[in-house]
């Protein structure tokens, strides 16, 4: 017999099982894995704590996705919950994984391809940049709509919403997602700080912190420029033996970046949108969320070679969902350099500002931000940056000269026209492609 927090035995002492759970939770530092959450859910359900166990199960289920394979597993854990579908899920189709993924991608593209194409047409308009003369665009995230509704109700509704097939323009999920990300009352505290709390509060904290992190990581599926609740819903139900829920299985399908572009071309064709480089690159960026190794680096490089800055912006936004202390600065610099090689100062500044946020005392990174902003014509921001740098190193004459050039609005002699760390062969290739684009537009290369 246990008390309200599930850790006190009949004699009043703490049970061994309770101690093990508390220890595991305390050592987790707020980062319980999906398997940890499923284990906790199973244990709580087994002890009759149906509300707490179901909350954790539903939270984990949203993050796992609702492939046919996962629905079977989750339904076994709690046959009476909303995870129990009315009709048995279709068995996983047999055959080659790549063939299954291609077939699934065609269906996906038919469902959301026109919507994505419309978003790309509005958001991927190209601008020709000339060093030192043009302003940059500040990229903003959508406003959230916080809610004071109970966490378990929000999680249950979102879980149920994802399980219903063929969702159309329903915006219920958008409200639920924004409510969970901005939920008040529990603002995402470290789980380890709640190790001694009642199990009802523990379950809420575990569910909310893990689900909020997942939803933030899934912003590319939910929000502009490509995302929508429709895309999020369809992606959550992708086959575990094919593309995988939320494209999680892409890493098992592609061997190199070229494979990604082939899949993207297939998606464009299946969506009946016709040949479109920007749209193909957008599909590459979308599917690349399933890559975490050197293949993602290769995709970034190839997009840079194609001047695919719209797609690189999508990848950058996804990378920036990580906490500041966990940012992949190497990839941020890679995207910055690809943007600079293509004279896209807006994207380069966006990436560089994140690098400055990561290392706020690094004067070199801050000075680079000033140079990029001034090169793109964002002079007021550049002035502020150079002044801040000179406050630390007033004797730096190069900074003084750059500040004067920014103030006079003539920064051409200091303007950066290539990436700081791009390999020489890539710089030359991108310069050649850039010159070709400028020649076609009738502009003069800087």
Image: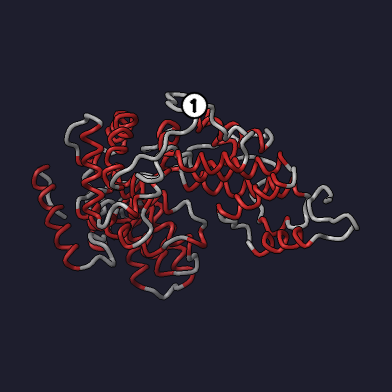
Most foreground residue, 85 or 195: 85
Circle 1 SS class:
loop
Residue most toward the right? 11
Most foreground residue, 386 or 138: 138
Q: Looking at the figure, which quarter contains the C terminus? A: bottom left
Where residue 186 appears, x then y in whole percent? 68, 45
Where residue 73 appears, x then y in whole percent? 53, 44
* Vertical side of 173 occupied by 288: above or below: below
| Residue 126 visible in this rendered orientation of the protein | no
Q: Looking at the image, how many numbered discs can be counted on the residues?
A: 1
Relative placement, left or right, of 54 versus 332 is: right
Residue most toward the top? 169
Most foreground residue, 156 or 72: 72
Relative placement, left or right, of 40 versus 422 is: right
Quarter-of-image position of residue 222: top left
Relative placement, left or right, of 203 versus 61 is: right
Q: Residue at x 30, y 53 (%)?
A: 409
* Vertical side of 109 occupied by 414: above or below: below
């Amino acid at each position: 017999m246990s008390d309200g927090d599930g850790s006190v035995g009949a004699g009043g002492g703490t049970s061994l099982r309770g101690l093990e759970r508390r220890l595991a939770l305390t050592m987790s530092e707020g980062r319980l894995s999906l398997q940890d959450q499923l284990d906790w859910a199973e244990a709580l359900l087994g002890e009759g704590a149906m509300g707490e166990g179901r909350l954790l199960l539903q939270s984990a289920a949203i993050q796992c996705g609702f492939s046919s394979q996962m629905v079977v597993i989750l339904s076994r854990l709690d046959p009476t919950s909303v995870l129990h579908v009315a009709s048995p899920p279709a068995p996983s189709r047999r055959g080659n994984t790549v063939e299954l993924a291609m077939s699934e991608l065609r269906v996906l593209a038919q469902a959301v391809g026109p919507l994505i194409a419309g978003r790309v047409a509005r958001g991927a308009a190209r601008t020709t940049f000339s060093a030192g003369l043009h302003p940059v665009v500040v990229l903003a995230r959508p406003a959230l709509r916080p809610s004071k509704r109970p966490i378990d109700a929000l999680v249950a509704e979102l879980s149920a919403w994802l399980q219903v097939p063929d969702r159309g323009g329903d915006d219920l999920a958008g409200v639920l997602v924004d409510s969970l990300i901005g939920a008040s009352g529990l603002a995402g505290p470290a789980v380890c700080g709640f190790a001694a709390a009642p199990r009802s509060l523990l379950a809420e904290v575990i569910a909310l912190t893990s689900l909020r992190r997942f939803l933030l990581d899934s912003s590319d599926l939910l929000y502009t420029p490509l995302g929508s609740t429709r895309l999020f819903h369809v992606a959550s139900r992708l086959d575990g033996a094919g593309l995988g829920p939320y494209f999680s299985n892409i890493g098992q399908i592609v061997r190199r970046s070229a494979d990604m572009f082939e899949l993207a071309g297939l998606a464009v064709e299946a969506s009946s949108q016709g040949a479109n480089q920007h749209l193909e690159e957008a599909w590459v960026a979308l599917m690349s969320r399933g890559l975490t190794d050197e293949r993602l680096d290769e995709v970034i490089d190839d997009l840079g070679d194609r001047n695919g800055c719209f797609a690189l912006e999508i990848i950058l936004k996804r990378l920036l969902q990580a906490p500041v202390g966990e940012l992949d600065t190497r990839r941020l610099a890679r995207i910055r350099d690809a943007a600079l090689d293509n004279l896209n100062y807006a994207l380069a500044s966006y990436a560089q500002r994140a690098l400055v946020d990561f290392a706020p005392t690094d004067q070199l990174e801050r000075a680079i931000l000033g140079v990029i902003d001034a090169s793109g014509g964002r002079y007021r921001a550049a002035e502020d940056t150079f002044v801040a740098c000179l406050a630390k190193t007033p004797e730096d004459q190069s900074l003084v000269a750059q500040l004067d050039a920014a103030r006079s609005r003539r920064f051409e002699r200091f303007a950066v026209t290539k990436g700081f760390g791009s390999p020489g062969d890539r710089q030359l290739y991108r310069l050649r492609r850039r010159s070709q684009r400028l020649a076609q537009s009738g502009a003069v290369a800087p």
